[in-house]
Amino acid sequence: MSRSALVGNVTAMLTDAGFTVSDRCAIRPKSFDIAARRGEDLILVKILGNVDGFDGMTGAEMRRLGSYLNATPFVIGLRTRDEDLKPGVVYFRHGVPVFSPDTAMDLFVENVPPLIYAAPGGLYVSIDSDILADEREKRGWSLGHLATELGVSRRTVSKYEDGMNASIEVAMALEDLFDAPLTSPVDVMDGAETVRDAEPTPEDPAVEPEDEGITAVLTRAGFDVHPTTRAPFKAVGEDTSEEESLLTGNSAFTKTAEKRARIMGSLGKVTLTRSVYFVDKAPREEVEGTAIVEREEAEAARDGEELRELIRERTTPPEEHA
């Protein structure tokens, strides 16, 4: 299957599941392909045939964007170099959950979350430690007795009851012994944080020299500006006074800039943010929901509120897209 067809299939699946899906980010470089929203859930999705092509820089940017936009980043892919991704299994690349289209279909359309995740050494599941302890005590079994039944050490059983996850084989043996469901689903929409080591959000990249001027303008206006390196927009501005975010671009007004502005407008509708593209000379005031503002206009704004009003006049309020 071509990557374009795969993106189309994933987009159709998310639409069928009730998501509002952005236009495809058909421009390079790009850290994600589409954004999608269903209610309060916002996701940023990278779609790949071979997930080994997902590199560390892209993973870091997706995690940063997830933090700035209150979104969950993940990758939907078909295979690694060595094997197809297994259905119902969550993998990880550079701190980002990865799973197959079949797993995505189960999760988003059928509302059946995955139970299994991959980690060094094999496939694992989360054991509900409270239920495990209750079931063992209900039968009057000691830790040692259960350890003998499972063929593991007493210390290992104690760790299971303290919250350590188990291999699939052990989980199946436990459920056979107790005739009760003991596994907990992997919470993909929470970044699967309970089954992977917590990692801090990567630091922002440096501001590009050509963006320093407009970054200074936005900072004076009260925005925390977070540069990007692989997104369709140059930065995310977090408005510290109004708890709003802003997707920003900055370049000469070219055909490529116009294309980026269109994509930003589509993303803004899904992420519920305004978008603005700063240019030297503006032939129009907006492009499909993205405000087009001349840099001189922005620099001439007397204060942050005047700049915000200039952007508001040329964009649709985010809540009207909801």
Image (spheres, helix red, strand yellow):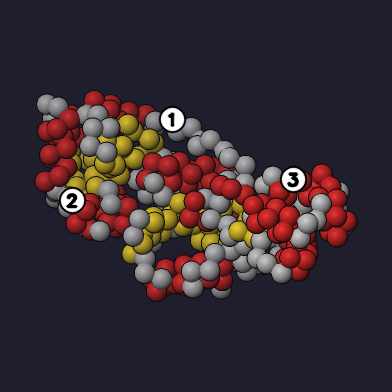
Mark 2 and mark 3: Cα distance apart in space: 51 Å
Quarter where residue 215 is shown:
top left
Q: Report the disc number at residue 159.
A: 3
Q: Amino acid at mark 3?
A: Lys
How many other residues sit within 10 Å of disc 2, few (<14), some (14-19) or many (≥20)?
some
Q: Would residue 4 appear left or right of 321 to someone viewing this image?
A: right
How many other residues sit within 10 Å of disc 1, few (<14), some (14-19) or many (≥20)?
few
Q: Would residue 65 appear left or right of 307 to someone viewing this image?
A: right
Identified at 43% across, 42% down, the residue is 67
Identified at 56% across, 67% down, the residue is 103
Which is nearer the eye, 13 or 129? 129
Q: Would residue 174 appear left or right of 211 to someone viewing this image?
A: right
Which is nearer the eye, 308 or 195? 195
Quarter where residue 86 is shown:
bottom right
**Are the residues flagged by discs 2 and 3 in contact, CB closer than 8 Å?**
no
Quadrant holding the C terminus: bottom left
